[in-house]
Amino acid sequence: MTFKQFALRNVQRNLSSYLAFFMASTISVMVFFIFSVAYFHPDMNLSKDSGHLTVILTAILPYQYGCSLVFILYSLGTFLHRRWGEFGVLRLLGITDRQFIKLMFFENILIGLISIISGILLGLLFSKYFFFVISMIFQFPLGFSLSAFPIVLTFIAFISLFMLVSILSPFFVRSQNIYFLLTKSRKQNRQPKAPLLKAVCGIGIILFLYGLLLNALRNPDGLDDLLLAKMVTYLEYDNILAVFIILTIITYLIFSHASTLGVTLLKRNLRFYFHRTNLLWISSLAHQAKQNARNLFISTLLITISIAITASLYTSYLYTAEGIIKDFVGPISYVSYPQDKQLKENINYIDTYLKKNGYEYKKVQIPVLALSKIEDHTGQRPAIALISNSHFNQLARFLGRETISLEGNNSLVLVWKGYGTKMDPLDEIEYQEMVLGGRKINVIEVTYKPFLNFGALIYYVISDSLYHQVKTNYPTYTFVEYQIPNWTRLGDFSAQITERFNYNEGPRQVHTAANYFQSDLIHNKTYFFLGSFISMVFFIAAISFLYFRLFADIQGEREKYHNLTKIGLKRREIKRIITGQLAIFFFSPFAIASIHTYMVLILWNHENAESAPFDKILQVIIIFGVIQILYFIWIRSKYIRTIFHYLDQGKS
Amino acid sequence: MNILELKKVCKIYEGTVSYQALDDMDFTVKSGEFIGVMGPSGSGKSTLLNVISTNDFPTSGQVFLLNQDLHRLSEDSLAQFRRSNLGFVFQDFNLMDSLTIRENILLPLALEGTRFSTMNQALQKIAMQLGLTEILERFPYEISGGQAQRVAIARAIIHRPSLLLADEPTGNLDSRASHDVLNVLEQMNQDFGVTILMVTHDPIVASHCHRVIFIKDGRIYNEMYRGANQQAFYQEILNVLSLLGGARYDF
Ligand SMILES: Nc1ncnc2c1ncn2[C@@H]1O[C@H](COP(=O)(O)OP(=O)(O)O)[C@@H](O)[C@H]1O
Ligand SMILES: [Mg+2]
């Protein structure tokens, strides 16, 4: 028998202990594969898009890969731990290190290959089915389209992952001596040496990190100041990745450290601990704490991701209009250059149309002095303009914001930060260096709130007296802003006036939000569709991990209950214990994931918190919660049935 | 008063080859008796104990415990009956890996909802008697086989059952330790009137019983009462064992 055959036989014979590891690997492959199918779906157009959604989706791919690596290493650890007895025998029989490494390598590559293939096949099956079901639900025709790329990507990504794991795995075992291997495999994890100290440290770190996030919640711009955010923002993943990383660490600490505190406290309360079946479920939680921690951790992350994706895509779909208007300030903006002779006529045209068709509207018209040409904002230096205090107040009242009053050389600086500009925002210092009519301007405040989102990039709001003094030195532009509550129905009219006014690049700009509404709506719907699909996959993966964890242990558990019935444990009590344990197992990840989802979404949408409202997020969480509860009921009855069936068998 | 009564109890294990482990068992146990059960390996001793303890059903026949036909009770009332009236020492100990020794011993009391202070008093006493005080905080895999056996005994008697069923409780112990265990059992029997039914291979241990039942091939082969003289009883037991002969003993 060659060595390769031996390795193959070994896998065949140890099938049951391989199975759990194999399942974990397969699920990881499947999730990655399905995600990349959706991600590289032609309708997603991710490469051409640079919005927030793309950022979050793009961040998920490497994140999920990292999670897979960690999870597969973890599973390998428990898997090898279970087989320590077998390794001990092999070592006793004199297997050499070289042979051992070879054995491990072949085994892992074999399992890896099989799980990659089955993961991709399962993924194909699932994605086809899901595309069908979800397009029914959403009434949205979106074909299942498959290119070779996701398959190749998944294959390469995971074959290299398993190579890495294969190279690492002998080190898990090699250093242990034979006696240790032979005896340790029977024993379970002991309690940590100083559970309270560990727990208190963990909770300290958790509170600190939550503090950072809550602080960021109250003061969103402060998020950029997080050390971690600075480290990762240069990857252009935005600070959402930093939030992910912080939440990942928190989740890990909750399950590995804080949970020991809970169990230890329960154990210390002797009267409670030794009351009826408490003894059994608490000790069982403590006993399996370490293994549970890993699984609960990974499930919580996956559940968080899936709820967060769905909720954010859902809200951005619902609030498509609000998302657009955020970039526009008003649904129609008209920027008139000094040489524009048709300002009055054009505004009249718009007003007439709006009145005739029964639209309610408000408008404001303000003059602006341009220090540099504002026709083209992609130039080398940011275009700069001046607004008088009273005109600014007019605008502020129009937008429902606070007015100010400026004296002398004092000035307020409005900075337009986004949308199509290639320029980095300047340092605040640079705003200070402004001289007007021989007088140095004294900047008292810089604000990034949108007031005028077209024309110049930087507006100086100056006192009326200074404005009048310098007025004649610079060309005057006129801005007309509209507010129209029902603007989303203005699609056709928008196209018409864009065509009419901008004809031949006339001396004006017209910006209409409604132009973008329909296309954005479809775009967001597509994202919502594919996003829910991805979320479902993540969610299924998450609950599968819980499922495998439970049923991997069921042999030991039913032995345990068998022994306990012998000394008089009632079925009713068994049911109660199992229900309690499963409830903790299923709902603690969900509860933590819900809280974290909310934090992610608020932080992510911090620029427009109103488009991540609590009730909409709650709706999504409730839907996932219902799925989770149904799943819990199903698993519970299945689990209890399996245990009872075994107990009945024992009595022939 | 009869605490236990077996009427024509048969047990057949169904399988590819069905096997009759108990064949027409008929006997009664009076309250307060201390009975030894002996017989070759595979003769059906453990099966007998399982049927009596309601952990297994007889194929035919009836078992009356405290004048109740137990196998007619529902699953949960059976469990309740077991844990308030019976105590077991199993051949393979049956200790729970996830519980410490203290927790293992207290489990029956905890399930009953006994007050914590009462539990503790009972534990102190039994741990002292069986020499377990030092190892109360350890887990089952951290103690020796003999210690595990004593823990199993402690767990079986801590709630003062009316009937104690023990499957080779001294099987793994050296003579000193088995003497200690025997002492505890005798004390339980004398002081608290606990009825004991104990499987054993050790003729010396058996000679402490009031009565010894010999089993062969699932039938009662012989039955002997102890006279005043323990030494003589020991001799008689040895004689029967040699007559039973041929069979292997699982020491
Ligand atoms: N669950 C079972 N299924 C089939 N046969 C069994 C089972 N349990 C015990 N036996 C058989 O019944 C006989 C009696 O077993 P047991 O009562 O354990 O003997 P003892 O305890 O006296 O050594 C043995 O021959 C054994 O092989
Ligand atoms: Mg036996």
Image: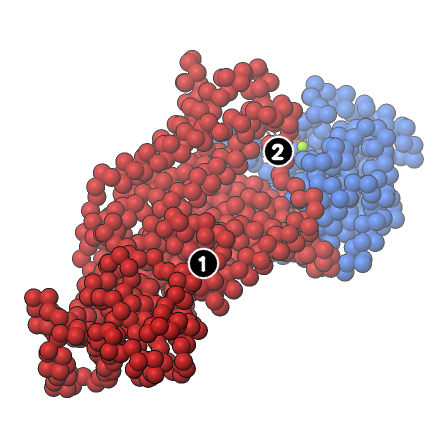
Q: Chain B is which colour?
A: blue
Q: What residue type is labelled 2?
A: Arg
Q: Nearer the viewer, residue B34 or A122?
A: A122
Rendering coords of residue A2 (x, y %)? 42, 13
What residue lies at 41% left-to-right and 18% top-to-bottom? A4
Residue B221 visible? The answer is no
What residue lies at 86% left-to-right and 39% top-to-bottom? B183
> What residue does disc 1 label?
A224
- Under tag 2, what secondary structure? loop
Badge 1 local density, few (<14 within 10 Å), some, or many (20+)? some
What residue lies at 54% left-to-right and 47% top-to-bottom? A292
Q: Who's red, chain-wise?
A: A
Instruction: Tell me the quadrant of the picture where the C terminus of chain A can be found.
Output: top right
Q: Do the residues labelled 2 and 1 touch (CB within 8 Å)?
A: no
> What residue does disc 2 label?
A186
Residue B48 visible? The answer is yes
Rendering coords of residue A584 (x, y %)? 54, 56
Instruction: Tell me the quadrant of the picture where the N terminus of chain A can be found.
Output: top left
Chain to which the residue tagged by mark 1 belongs: A
